[in-house]
Image (cartoon, helix red, strand yellow):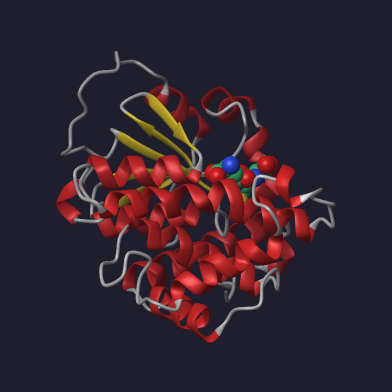
Amino acid sequence: MNPDQSDQYDAGTAVIADSQQQQQQSDAPQQQPGPFSTNPTVNDLVLYHAPNTRSAGARILLEELGVPYRLHVLNMKANEQRSPAFLAVNPMGKVPALVHQGVLITEQAAVYLYLADMFPQAGLAPAVNDVMRGAYLRWMVFYGSCFEPALIDQAMKREPGPPSATPYGNVETTIATISDHLEKGPYILGDRMTAVDILWGTSLQWVTRFKLMTPTPAVQAYIDRMAARPSFAKIRDEDAALSAQHASEADPQKGAAPASS
Ligand SMILES: N[C@@H](CCC(=O)N[C@@H](CS)C(=O)NCC(=O)O)C(=O)O
């Protein structure tokens, strides 16, 4: 279905809504926090998303979990992430931003941890009393506290300072730590695919595509393994369509031909 034809359409489990007005009506925190329904209706769970950004991984995770959710698409080409309506949801103006029954969850690792725990039937998170939970948390947090800061500092040519005073030590060690770990494979926790693989699968794809890191053969095999999952292919295609739509809105002369990713 062409998203141009309607401001709401069903995309599998996701219902896409672009109307800011509708967002303000239905996403404003209306309920007191309390025990959440683990069998949500589509309006219980709202993901704010922009195509080809960090929120793509959250969409992939929601696909893998198979839970209904409403997708609120932000057009970053039109700077919608800085609109007062979205800043009222997430003052950081960033995606992913997840609203579950009126409660906001931001930051990739928190979004992944939250969703995989909230919907345990998919088996994408080790239980709290599973010893592998420690490794799962380690790699989830290592991503945001070491890997991403290291690669962004490097890309921006920022001097990180002495390793002993830098949270990630140095870029080389940080990259080697995840690359060496993936030699064991096939997944971060060994034989078991979990939510943390969706975080690393999407981000390693991104950093290698933009040449922020040279993949070892094991890292490349891991990227390919994750990219071959139907959930990755589905969101890649849907994001390409959304991105083309945003491009054509910015420049109608270019038309809305789907972008290849
Ligand atoms: N710390 C955040 C970073 C989120 C982030 O930077 N998202 C980017 C998209 S990849 C964004 O929303 N940028 C919009 C902007 O800053 O204007 C997380 O881990 O989720």
* Residue in view at x 52 percent, y 26 percent: 89
Q: Position of residue 83 (x, y in %)?
A: 65, 31
In the rendered view, would you say 82 is above or below 187? above
Q: On the image, which quarter does residue 65 sit in? A: bottom left
Q: From the viewer's perspective, tell me whether residue 241 is left or right of residue 126.
A: right
Q: Which residue: 44% across, 55% down?
A: 139
Q: Position of residue 122 (x, y in %)?
A: 19, 55
Residue at the spot x=70%, y=73% of the render?
211
- Residue situated in front as seen by the camera: 10 or 220: 220
Residue 100 drawn above or below residue 183: above
Viewed as shown, does residue 41 lie left or right of 74? Answer: left
Asked if residue 219 can be seen in this view, the reply is yes
Task: Give the x, y percent position of residue 215.
Answer: 59, 79
The image shows residue 30 at horizontal and vertical percentages of: 34, 15
Q: Of residues 251 and 185, which is closer to you in this image?
A: 185
Quarter of the image that includes the C terminus? bottom right
Quadrant observed for ligand 1 in the rendered image: top right
Q: Residue furthest front?
A: 164
Q: Tell me what residue is drawn at x 59 percent, y 67 percent.
A: 206
Any part of residue 13 in sight: no
Q: Is residue 168 above or below residue 21?
A: below
Where the N terminus falls, by quadrant? bottom left
